[in-house]
Image (cartoon, helix red, strand yellow):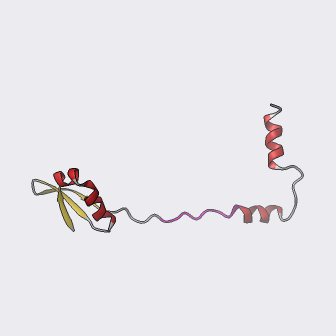
Amino acid sequence: MKTTTIRELRHDTTMVLEWVKNGETVEVTRRNEPVAILSAPGRKRRSVRPDFAARLKRIYGRQALAVTATELIAEARGER
């Protein structure tokens, strides 16, 4: 674990954040007393999105709808 002072953090934030980006954990001190620990966030998991196309195919099959979504929206909006 690397250590930095508050002053060094203020004046050279880019360098300290580069350490964190490279996987280092950085302890921030004030008058030789630790006040914070900086570390990179954990990797976020990609959320799995539902397969809407497969769901629609399962519900409607190959059936063609009589009216398209564009026509339904235009009808709901009325004439402009």
- The residue located at (90%, 52%) in the rendering is 66
Residue furthest out toward the top: 80
User: Which residue is at a point 30% across and 62% down the rendered structure image?
Assistant: 18
Q: Residue at x 52, y 65 (%)?
A: 46
Horizontal and vertical percent position of residue 53 = 73, 63
Q: Which residues are magenta?
A: 45-52
Residue 13 left/right relative to 49:
left
Vertical arrangement, residue 3 with respect to residue 8, above or below: below
Decide whether the magenta segment is chiefly helix, strand or loop: loop
The residue sitting at the left extreme is 31
Dividing the picture into quadrants, the one containing residue 4 is bottom left
Quadrant of residue 23 within the rendered picture: bottom left
Residue 2 lies in magenta, yes or no? no
Q: Nearer the viewer, residue 24 or 76?
A: 24
Q: Is residue 72 left or right of residue 21?
A: right
x%, y% of residue 29?
Answer: 16, 56
- Residue 76 in the image: state x and y as whole percent: 80, 37
* Residue toward you, 26 or 36: 26
Horizontal and vertical percent position of residue 5: 16, 56
Image quarter where the N terminus lies is: bottom left
